[in-house]
Image (cartoon, grey):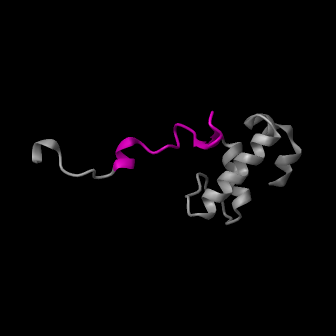
Amino acid sequence: MLDAFQEEEIVNKVGGRFQLTSLIQKRLVALNRGARPLVELPTNNTMVIVVEEIMQDKIFLDATGQVALAPEEAPDLETLLGDAGPDVGDV
């Protein structure tokens, strides 16, 4: 896992060492606060999970410097809203 840091691929993938450090730190906080991992691994080591998420292009830093999910990993609007209440016709 940490061999990935010896390769420039992971650094280039996120746009530099500073961005890599920021992405890792922010994603580690999210996972430690209960966010679900985006990859299936036989480990609970959050650092391994974050590195694999980056290598599989599951997460990245957006233009504001926040962690963003790859479009195919983001939940759809219906999943986010769930049951938002009755339809207008039901009222």
Residue 55: percent from left, percent from top: 71, 43
Q: Position of residue 91 (x, y in %)?
A: 10, 48
Image quarter of the N terminus: bottom right
Residue 40 found in image quarter: bottom right
Between 39 and 82, the one lying in front of the other is: 82
Q: Nearer the viewer, residue 16 or 37?
A: 16
In the rendered image, residue 78, in percent from the top left (x then y), is placed at 34, 44
In the rendered picture of this protein, how many numbered marks are placed on residues? 0
For the residue pair 5 and 80, the one nearer the viewer reads as: 80
Query: Which residue is drawn at the image coordinates 82% and 41% (left, top)?
Result: 17
Residue closest to the far bottom: 44
Image-based side of 23 in relation to 85, left or right: right
Residue closest to the far front? 64
| Nearer the observer, 3 or 32 | 32
Residue at the image point whose x is 69% and y is 44% from the top: 54
Magenta includes 56?
no
For residue 32, above or below residue 60: below
Residue 2 % position (x, y)? 83, 54
Q: Which residues are magenta?
A: 59-81
Is residue 74 shown in magenta?
yes
Name the residue: 84% across, 47% down: 5
* Residue 74 in the figure: left or right of residue 91: right
| Side (left or right) of 42 relative to 17 | left
